[in-house]
Image: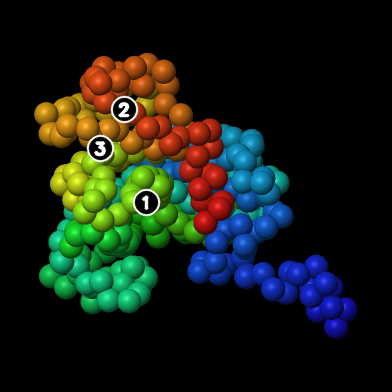
Amino acid sequence: MLAHIKSVLNFSAFRPEPDDSRASWIARFPVRTTGLLHLGRNTMAFARINRAGEPEAKGRGQGEYKQMFTELGSDLREGIFEGWYTVSVDTRYVISIESNLSRKPGSEAAMRKDPRSMLHARYEKGKRYAVTHNPETNSSLLLTMDEENIKKIETLCREQKIKVGRICCGAYVLLRHALSVTNVKKGSETPVSALYIISCDGSVCALLQEKDHWIEVRSRPDLFTEDPKPLLDLLQPFQEKLGEGTGIVLACDEPLQPVVMEALAGMFPGRTIQDLTETGFLARLLHAH
């Protein structure tokens, strides 16, 4: 009884449970230190996220997942409330533009729970999906992830006593955020044209939007580290496709190196580059939502 009274007095009785994925991260862990785990192809990076949403201690490993989980196990758990992590999987995924997907109420949630009913002939067994609809056209961005890889990661986390409170694709999260903060004035009188460039722990996505229409998307997991050439090669086809007044919107998990920013400015001369990125950007976004 005393425990119930205490939970009411400190308001914990009114908070969602830590494993309630329907609630925002900050509502589930309002005064706790949790973690962010990045997983790419043979790479792992982690950070402790304090109660203010700021990344603190960090670490990185390279090799097979099982080896890295074993080697970093104690560091991964240190200081993390009950082992709770958000996991960003930035490998073995595809982002594509699809047309005429169902938009009935709850369609985005249904895509995660029962994608076959939403995709029909486009459905592939062994995949997990998420969708974002363009509010001005019949186009949608479809995220397709490899389910076997996700299950492997979930199993390894359990073995290391890491609790997965959320699993996502960081590049997709950043792309959705960039679209939401730039497409704020909607309608035929104020259409938005931009090339969205997303980078997340070496994975890259580029989306060309012309007057609210999604024209082309190019997405490559595990693309580059320090050498900007693979990034520039992916972006090169867009050079001749940008219309007059089309600017660049950049959103990355962490600020890009100056040499990469200089290369982007040289590739798109005269174009305005709106850089949304800040230190610990993905960690802050995931903590707040």
- Indicate the secondary structure of the residue bearing disc 1: loop
Residue 272: image tag: 2
- Is residue 263 positioned above or below 42 on the image? above
Q: Are marks 2 and 1 in contact (CB under 8 Å)?
A: no
Residue 35's x, y, as percent?
59, 48
**Which residue is outermost to the bottom?**
1
Q: Residues within 10 Å of mark 2 (few under 14, many from 20)?
A: some
Give how far apart the Cα atoms at labels 2 and 3 are. Answer: 10 Å
Residue 249 shown left or right of residue 30 in the figure: left
Residue 280 shown left or right of residue 7 in the figure: left
Q: Residues within 10 Å of mark 3 (few under 14, many from 20)?
A: many
Give how far apart the Cα atoms at labels 2 and 1 are. Answer: 18 Å
Residue 195: image tag: 3
Residue 261's x, y, as percent?
36, 21
Q: Earlier in the sequence, mark 2 or mark 1?
A: 1
- Indicate the secondary structure of the residue bearing disc 2: loop
The number of numbered badges drawn on the structure is: 3
